[in-house]
Image: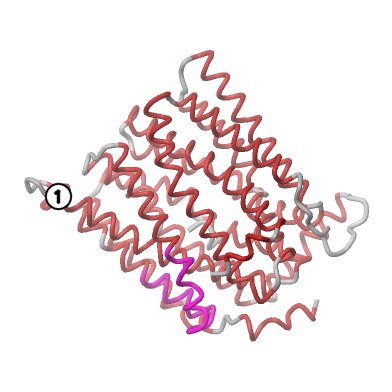
Amino acid sequence: MKFKLLKDKNFSLLMFGKITSLIGSNMQSFALSLFVLSTTGSATKFASILAVTLIPGLILSPISGVIVDWFYRKNILIFLDLASGIVVSIFAIIYFITGEMSLINIYILVILLSLISTLDNPTLQTIIPTITKKEELVEANALNSLLMAIGNVISPAIAAFIYGSFGLEAVFIVNAISFYISAFSEVFLVIPRNIKSKGKLSLNKFANEFKDGIKFILKKKDIINIVSLAVILNFALGSFTIGSAFISKIILKVSDFQYGMIDTFGVLGMILATFIVGWFSRKYSIGKNIYISLMLASVFLSLYSIVALKSLVNIQGSIVYLYLIMLIITFLMCMFIGIANTFVSAGLQSIVPLDFLGRVSTVVSTGCMLASPLSSMIYGYLFDKINVSSIFLISSVIMIIAMLLFKKSLYEVNIEEKVNLKECEIDIEGI
């Protein structure tokens, strides 16, 4: 991995800003999940929080791509962090005055933050290729994933300490400060402006830009296949998103710290992925790497069914061993998901012209999110109603069938073969 990229002022400032706000956001998400599960004990209500978080992005993502391709991306980053900091600050004040945080208030908070952050990922994805050489894109995305993963490792531990010692209000305050620090650091970024001048903004031009982006995507079969696959996989992975929390707190009844360690092991898997992705890139094509890594992730997902078996849970002294198995499974599954995400990001940045990258990124992100709200609600209901082990087995089968159906089209995706798209003028990121 090329750590020398961090010597570049623009790249290091961009990474510092994003990891700072990420730590604050993940702390808040972790604390809210503990708060909801401890006060309600319901997987359905916990899942509803995840679902409403995704809905604004699902609706606005395609439009946000036009905005990212139109306006100066540095200003977008600064605005997003300032707006997020203000929203969190307001809710910290409300919580301080009232001394409570109802589910309705939590819904409003996560919806507002989701609306603001809809632009964040496509903006970041379009900035990286503008400040990085093309031959360093895989390494740049791997380094980005590494730093974000480090933030994910730190977040649960910090959140557990602050939430356990000072309560939810303190988590809000720290998160707001993290957004303000991120916005300040981004002021010093030097980012090239968008490739071509868009002229004066108008509704007609905005609509035309949106249509042009859709037309471009419809001509690219590989992008359509990735979006279609993302919808299926993100639906199936709802079992992991909801199930890991449900198994930890409801079945195994582990402590808040132990629950945080499960998240930490998942992120450690993604960190390892960033170190080995370079070896995979030299051995296999982009599409083959995506296929192999996601197929292995689906196999490890099925192993969660073992951890949730009542016959094993009821054995005296088995909880500690089941918990350790869960840590290992989470580590390996997230490692392969991390490998897939890195190759998807690098592939899209290489084969899509920068002038279309914002719109393409948001369409891919929308595909990733498309099934997630419905998935969260369905799996939340299922975990409350039916055998937990069977849910993971069914989800794994869905993923494996999807990968087999798209195997041929994925194998055709290769950066070297598609670079010439730039002359003619893929988040599985949400997984």
- Quarter residue 295 falls in: bottom left
Which residue type carries mark 1?
Lys
In this rendered view, identify the residue nearer to me: 336 or 386. 336
Magenta stretch holds residue 282: yes
Residue at image x 31%, y 39%?
A: 257
Q: Is residue 82 left or right of residue 22?
A: right
Q: Is residue 27 above or below residue 140?
A: above
- Quarter residue 160 falls in: top left
Residue assigned mark 1:
310
View extreme (left): residue:
316
Residue at image x 48%, y 69%?
A: 340
Magenta stretch holds residue 377: no
The magenta span reads: 272-296
Q: Is residue 249 above or below residue 302?
A: above
Q: Is residue 6 left or right of residue 399?
A: right
Q: Main secondary structure of the magenta part?
A: helix
- Quarter residue 168 falls in: top left
Residue 236, horizontal then vertical, whole percent: 40, 59
Q: Is residue 153 left or right of residue 37?
A: right
Q: Is residue 81 above or below residue 64?
A: above
Q: Is residue 269 above or below residue 254?
A: below
Residue at image x 60%, y 32%?
A: 177
